[in-house]
Amino acid sequence: MNKWRRLFQFELRMLFGNRWLLGLPIVFGLLVFWNLERLPGREILFFQRSYTSLTLLHTMSLGLTMLLGVMTIRRDIRRTSYEWNAALPVSYMSRISAKYTAAVLYFTIFSVLAGAAFAWNSARMDVAFSITREFAVYYLLTFEVSYLVTLALAMLLAICIANRAVYLIAFCAWMFGTFFLDMFLLDRNKWYVLRTFHLNQLFVTGDADAETWGIRLIADELAASRWFVLAFALLLLTAGVLLLNRIRPTAFRRSNWVAGGLALVLAVGAFVPYLSIWGERYAELHAKLSDPGVKTVEALRDHQVETFQIERYDINLQREPDDRLKIKAALDIPAGQLTGRSELLFTLNRTFQVNRLTVSGSPVKFSHEGERLTVPLTAPLNADKTVQVEMEYAGKVMDYVAQNYTEGSYLAFVKGENVLLPGYMAWYPLPGDFPVYMKNSGGSDSLQAAVDFGGWHLPTSQFRISTSGFASKVYGNLEHMEQTGEGQVFEGKSAAVIRFYSGEFEEVSNPKLPVRLVTTPYDVKTAEKLLEAWAGEYVYFAGWVNHLDPKLDQVLMLSMNNNHSFDIENKTYYLIWLVSEVDYFADQLMNSMLLGTNEGEMNILKASEDVRPQLRALMWYMYYREYKGYTADDLKQGSGGGLLYNLFEPSEDADPDHVGLRMAAQVAGALDEGKNKQVKEVLNHFYALGLEIPNQVDAEGGPRPIPYAEWEQEWKRVMHDADAN
Amino acid sequence: MIHIDHLSKKYTRGGLALDDVTLTLNEGMVGLLGPNGAGKSSLMRILATLTPPTSGEATLFGVSLRQAEEIRRMIGYLPQQFQVYPQLTGVEYLDYVAVMKGMTDKKKRKAEIEALLEQVNLQDKARKRVQTYSGGMKRRLGIAQALLGSPQVLIVDEPTAGLDPEERVRFRNLLTRFSLGRIVLLSTHIVADIESNCRQIAVLDKGKVKLSGDLSELQEFGQGKVWEVRLSESQFARLDPMSVVSTRPTEGGLLCRIIGEVPLEGAQEATLVPPTLEDGYLALLRKGQTEGATRG
């Protein structure tokens, strides 16, 4: 032990006695703190940006690890002029372990600095201590594990290659282990299972660089990966000692081989749990890919869904402690529409096993293949009544897809307090044969959610969904009615699929704004700024818009690497990314709140036949003139941004008569004459008619088109009255 | 006592470094003599347990080379090329080596280090960093580290390289003193290094043992083969340089000391002279070369 202690002290002195090496942690610390401090728009997407920043700095520092690992061996081992060392009665195991421990201690400073820099910035953002600690420890551990394996690899390389070429080889290993492994093996071939071999363990992203769920979702994989990496590092070190003992005679050759064998067994043993996680993911993925029922993008073009109305859903959604979902669903289906049908076709995700299914109280034989749940209609139907279908099903939801832009992600999951249950993944029975998954056109080796291909159109249903057993509050696109002792109850009408979300979220609000914003802890400050900017706009519009009818009352601002976005559903707006200043998003949200959806705008072929897009833009024109103080020329030059597009920049095809420009000129002239009140009166008139432009399919009973002539007529009426007075 | 029994060493890419070497080395100073590439360093590296032999066996005081860890506790080793961590002072370095050699008592360690530093004449530089040492000083520090712990066997490979004449004499005396009751195996290609101190010598050439015995046996090899001849400059120019041991200018020519079975043809005043140890060594090597050429 004396010898080992002295070796360790010696190695520490070699590292910490070198002023250059001593200075590097200081430089690294300054860089980390400075980088996190100067993140552009620091409070916007702080988590993602700090993750990227720390990842890059970590990759750079791994170059140093590689260099130092080689140098620590080349300092004396396998150098002819230091051969006297090998004649000393000291084992290579002692020498290598002392070198390794000292170097690890040196790099622990880097790990601690990274964790501390994050914790410091996190605390400054008023994020709860428990969350700050969770992520700071995550960075510290991840840095440390990367250093542990990189050092071991570098030392083994230096043991194997006695000449200076080892520096070049180590450089290549660093480049390959950080950049090329990522680009060529992981991304190109989608061999994400190999990501445990990535030297920079922060690149083990999935959705890890997104705060929303992120690392919590792959916690088991991270833990298994870390154990394997540690065992692998031990294997590399043992291999190094074994090689050195092959060069230098030892009486303990057999013990060395036994130790090597044990290290190998340990590494393989540690790889098994990691591999089993991936095995499970890939087994489910391949089952879907090899299912002929899962169509390709091309095949989906011809896929027609024959749907039917479900009048009422009554769903009991229960999460078990092991994340298993137990669901009871009662469906009221008007019988009139089913005349002539011998069966009902539902879409229900294959992950669920249906344990009981009754039609009007009688158990029936059903089939559940893929997502197709076929229920026979055996009893005669009474057209005036409803058919009641009840089913009980259960299953675990961890729906993995190997999507290369995120290094794999989950389409749906229930894991601890983290929940993503989008209706398009058919966690409850949907009426008709909806495609849930689709194979990509490039081949059958990748899968994605079919909803990406196009929107779904479902008949409106009345929902009542009670949830229980969830670890955190559940948010969704249905109105939250009550909090019960066991959970929550959501109720409302919806033509959209029902989505539920849960996780480490916080609610943010502003007293001037009738909206609840749900976001992640690191985006709270951004959310507050956003709400502040939005509240200013809201107060302005509420000041003159009669009967302002907010079209949204909830915003889910959950940043993540997921392209399954939507606009407004049942007064809920889903914001998955923030890249610009908050003012831009405040405009978008106010626009949605004031005017609702404009999804159907693409269906307006000629502007003069429906000037709702121009009227929506004029509402904002007023805002920019009155509230922001822009002149007519400023706005014509584009100062108003995208919301005024339909006035100043529509294509010649869409607005050949330049009605937008004419309407803007009319309003500009009136405002110049001080007829603000009259302009508002005109706009209020049309606002009361409805300026929402829903997709035509949903437009029955909704707002009607407003032709240009009607605008002219109302304009003249109000302005004439004004002139007359 | 060191017993070397049919020891051979073949390097993966090179030829045979040691070819069936059998030797018995007794206590005292043992000189291992041979030209460059003779296999001296290979033999020493094997005995220092730095590299395994390809075949054969050796024991040091009855301990087999296979018990490498045991052997390392018995030996001190100074390699031909020697470097020390430049950041350390001489004392720090020796203390580090002493701990590695298992000297746990701090006081004893300190006393031995001080004594050794004095013996190698480094006491004045002992607390200076090694990076300030000259080549000779580093060599002396190397000798000190090898002597630390009073090993039973001291293996020193070309130890006098880089030392000035005074240091060389001091060093030889140090080794001689140390060799009492121990074995000091000293390899060199400089005959003078072993002439005054070694009781026993072994001559290696091309991996084989050419001779093993005492100094007189080596010297005997030159008996009747060393001539002093007077040559003109033109005669000297035609002479095989390998046979000339030394030359001294005289009036009208050169007085050359040459090795050969017969005096040079045409030479004037050829006189058979008594051989020195170096003459014997050269005669032995020349014999080997001649035999090799004849066989070839």
Image: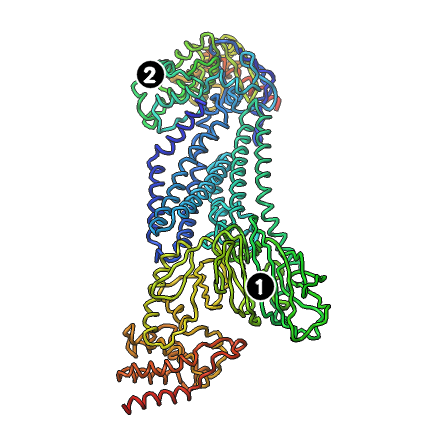
Evaluate whether label 2 is on the same chain as label 1. no
Taking A688 as reference, is B209 left or right? right
Q: Position of residue A373 (x, y in %)?
A: 66, 63
User: Does B158 appear above or below A651?
Assistant: above
Query: Which of the pair B230/A200 is nearer the observer?
Result: A200
Instruction: Give the residue number, with chain letter if any, for mark 2.
Output: B121
Q: How many marks?
A: 2
Q: Is residue B239 visible?
A: no
Q: Can residue A631 be seen in this view?
A: yes
Taking B256 as reference, is A194 left or right? right
Instruction: Give the residue number, with chain letter if any, for mark 1.
Output: A314
Taking A573 as reference, is A320 left or right? right
User: Does A218 appear above or below B96?
Assistant: below
Q: Is mark 2 on a helix, strand or loop?
A: loop
Q: Nearer the viewer, mark 2 or mark 1?
A: 1
Q: Position of residue A563 (x, y in %)?
A: 50, 62
Q: Residues within 10 Å of mark 2 (few under 14, many from 20)?
A: some
Calculate the distance from the C-alpha at mark 2 to the C-alpha at mark 1: 97 Å
Q: How is the image coloured?
A: rainbow
Q: Where is residue A87 in the image (x, y as percent from the top left)?
A: 48, 22
Quadrant (top left, top right, bottom left, bottom right) of the C terminus of chain B: top right
Q: Mark 1 lies on which chain?
A: A
